[in-house]
Amino acid sequence: MRRYIVSVITTVDGYFEGPGHDVMAMPFDDGFSRYNARLLLDADAVVHGSRWFDGGAYWTQVLADEQQPEIEREIGRLNVGLERLVISDSLQPDPSWPWFDRTRVVPRAAGPAEVARLKEGDGGTILSFGSATTWNPLLEAGLVDELHVLVGPALLGDGGKLFTGARRPLRLLDAEVLEDSQLVRLRYDATGA
């Protein structure tokens, strides 16, 4: 059975985005990209919400731009062949997407069943990055195996909260300060076991 891992950056006060959905308010540093690349090495599927999913246009451009930092181009390379599941009531598949042939869009009501189906297969891990409105209900449904929280050195005071559902027990598996970074990675068992 495949494992589903959610990785999200947050501020010390628990926001995954700033006011107005401003993700650039987050305390990103190079450790964030290196960690995401590490996760992508073992992945073969990614679950997205519709807000930031662009069909692969961003990563395709990064991969083609030799001026981009090598770690960002590596993330672009690692993203190329991955299966995509987008959970959205509004997004429609677009044949012009670079990842169109690897992308399925399902309505929110079907999201949990589709993630459960993905988990039943063989292969690498299933990932989500950010997109709390997408993974929060999947966590509540017991589908998330691990929650990786990258806590960064900032206080926002407002924005999108990391989790908005009912209380959910987590078990700390380990913690690390990412190399050459101010981010602290907390890795939790999210199964409630």
Image (spheres, rainbow, N blue to C red):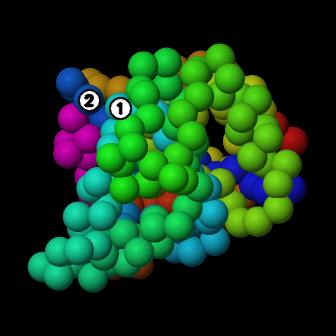
Question: Please, what is the dominant secondary structure of the magenta stretch?
Answer: loop
Q: Dot 1: few (<14), some (14–19), or many (≥20) neighbours within 10 Å?
A: some
Q: 53 and 141: which one is in front?
A: 53
Specify whether residue 3 is in view.
yes
Q: Which residue is mark 2?
A: 21
The quadrant in which the N terminus is found is: bottom right
Specify the quadrant of the image occupied by residue 123. bottom right
Residue at 27% across, 82% down: 70
Sequence-wise first label, 1 or 2 = 2
Q: 174 and 146: which one is in front?
A: 146
From this view, report whether residue 28 is shown above or below residue 165.
Answer: below
Specify whether residue 128 is in view.
no
Mark 1 vs mark 2: give the one in front. 1
Q: 100 and 34: which one is in front?
A: 100
Disc 2 residue type (three-letter): His
Q: Which residue is mark 1?
A: 51
Q: Which residues are magenta?
A: 22-29
What element does badge 1 sit on?
A: loop
Percent position of residue 147, x then y: 62, 48
From this view, report whether residue 143 is shown above or below residue 121.
Answer: above
Residue at 47% across, 72% down: 78
Whether 43 is among the magenta residues is no
Does the CB distance between marks 1 and 2 fall below 8 Å? yes
